[in-house]
Amino acid sequence: MPAAHPDTRNGPLHSAARAVRGIFATAPFTAGLWLVVLGAGIATGTLAGGSGQQAWLAELSYGLPSFSTGNWFTTLSGMFILAEPAGYLSVLVLIPLGVGWLEATRGTRTAVLAFFGGHLASVLLTAATLLLFRDLGSAWIDSLANDVDSGPSGGIFACLTLAACHVRQPWRGRWQFLLLAFAVLGATLFGEVPDLEHSAAILLVLVFKHRSISRPNLREQRFIAWVGLLGLVSVQILTIVVPTHGPFGPTHAGGGRIAVLLDAALAIGLARGLRSGRRIAWLAALVMAVLNVLRGALGVSLVLTMGPQLPHGSSLASLAAAVAGLWLLLAAHLLVCWRAFGILRHRRLRADARQAPLERAEVVTALKLHGGGTLSWMGTWDGNEHHRSPGGSLLAYQVHAGCAIALSDPVGPAGDRDAAMEDFSLAAEEAGLIPCFFSASAPPAAPADRWRAMQIARDTLIDLPQLEFAGKAWSDVRTALNRAARERVGFRLTLLIDEPAAVRRQLEEISSTWVGDKSLPQLRFTLGTLTEAEDPAVRVALAVDAHGQVQGFLSWLPVHAPGGAVVGWTLDLMRRREGGFGPVMEFLIASSLRAFAAEGEQFASLSGAPLAHTQHQPAEEPVDRVLGALSRALEPLYGFGSLQAFKAKFNPRTVPLYLVYRDESDLPRIAGAMARAFVPEASVGQLVREGFGALRELRGRRRA
């Protein structure tokens, strides 16, 4: 019998070959360029840093000396070779990040044109600038005019900038600001020929795509101040570590350590306040910038008056002038954008803080007038604030961890929904808070690139007209009803405030036992308690046995149509007696549905199943995959998935519910805020312990 050959179709070589084919299929120009640069480095020996190549390398390099002799072909011959191994390392990393990004998002043709066009334009613009200002007294320009360069970095930065100009806001504006800052710092502090070419490539693309540059809103003005302050301090730290060379002249490393470290400490303390738009942080940063400008001016004055007596006098003057100029730019931004930094700390939005809080009766009246969704009644609970839009809509919200979390959709005129959400968002941003909408039906329709929507739950709805528990799909429900009849368990739909004290004590006992079994406090925000169930508008379903013992109970929240009529009910509390009647929940829900149908209601909602939507799909976004992992991690604590499976017994139709947020950078803060909203009484230690415990249990299940 012949020996079996090992199957190599799934081996490492086959996987590598498949990956290479995928890269060439997705970004053929990027892959080819990467291989050409790598091959050129190997063939010429420059990748290994071989000696003796300087003479012929200078002949192939581009720059003003080459062009002065008519050697224009060097713009191409010097494109694929570099002088040092470190240059190859950076270029081989930047090619996929810049050229690859553009090719993957805008196509191969665009990447080819941007790369070669950006390379030629940046090289020629740099040479023309040096030619224009040569022999005018600047030692820096005169030295650069005699230098040559090689490599494709100009084309790479052109591709990177063009790709950044096509991303969604606010990332587009942030990328453009960071690239522009990189261009300015590279030219002013380091000032070598490659730095000028990088700056030229970035500026040329930004000018070409000037229509993609928009005026920054309040949030982005704060972002620029935040990044600018931290970036300036980082630049100062860099100047005391390495020498720099730019239009202000060369500098020596090592000076001004105490002042720079003091600036760094202050910047770290002020950074969060600037990002949030705090007035005190703005004022402190402005004073800090002005003091640094004055310090730079004083340094330049001292060098000019006492230059011969100071060691490295010209170096100190150059550094002081360069850094003072950057601080002056930051001070100018802070002054121009002063309106973005007027925030004092509030638990309510500034617009709402100027007026008395709405009474609960006013909120209920508005809800009955305009109607609401299945979660709207939760907005009447204590702990919520309310924001009124110019169009007359109300949004219930809570403020936690720097986030303003609006609950569900606005309650108000149907045509005011999008405008009300935008108004709430602007009010939150003016207050230095991150706006988001929890369990919204959809994001605002416009502008399209302002909002992201992530499905976080499914609302489970049961249509009540013609409701019949017939067929195999309802077998579990029929079994519960039949068993309740045999065991003489009765059903009563009532108001909690109408029940005798003995029944209410039993409900408190059942609820206390249920809460006591949990290692975390009872969830809040979109989950009520017996306090909310005492509302005369809320109905309670009781399962009582022949001895008068309550086996379980539910609470139902009203859903109003415009005009005030109740058209549906939303399930809130679900509690059962430990060791009592087994299928009590199925019995209570089925009996409630029958009662609501008999009264003429249109639907009942079994509420959303948080985090239970996540099943892996090929087109899933990374955030959705993270959400799925979070759902699996929290399953041992709150059983989101098992709750979804239980509700499936009632054959509901589902409606997606979304978390609407501005962009992905807000999600970490929103996650912390949601944790505080749902478990406001939990300590940080409890949350950490339960998180690690859930992860350990999840790992144990995977091993099993």
Image (tube, rainbow, N blue to C red):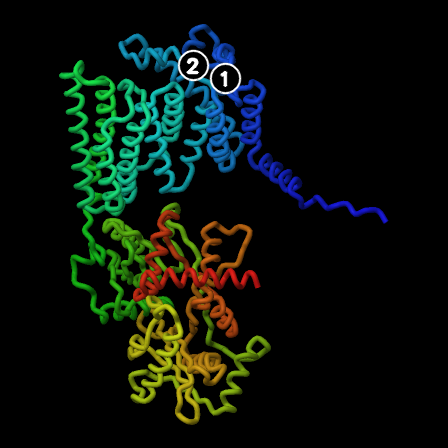
What crowding class fits label 1: few (fewer than 14 Cα within 10 Å), some (14-19), or many (20 or more)?
Answer: many
Give the residue drawn at x 40%, y 13%.
147
Q: Give the side of residue 322 with respect to residue 100, left or right.
A: left
Residue for badge 1: 78
Residue for badge 2: 148
**Who is closer to the viewer here, 657 or 642?**
642
Whole-angstrom CA distance, mark 2 to mark 1, is 10 Å
Nearest to N terminus: mark 2 or mark 1: 1
The relative height of residue 75 versus residue 440 in the rendered view (above or below) is: above
Q: Give the side of residue 128 with respect to residue 219, left or right.
A: right
Observer able to see residue 216:
no
**Who is closer to the viewer here, 486 or 520?**
520
C-beta proximity under 8 Å, tags 2 and 1: yes
x, y percentage for residue 179?
36, 32
What crowding class fits label 2: few (fewer than 14 Cα within 10 Å), some (14-19), or many (20 or more)?
Answer: many
Q: Which residue is most to the bottom?
A: 547
Give the amino acid type for the residue marked by disc 1 in the picture: Gly
x, y percentage for residue 178?
35, 34
Q: Kindly indicate the quadrant of the structure image that contains residue 246.
A: top left
x, y percentage for residue 288?
18, 36
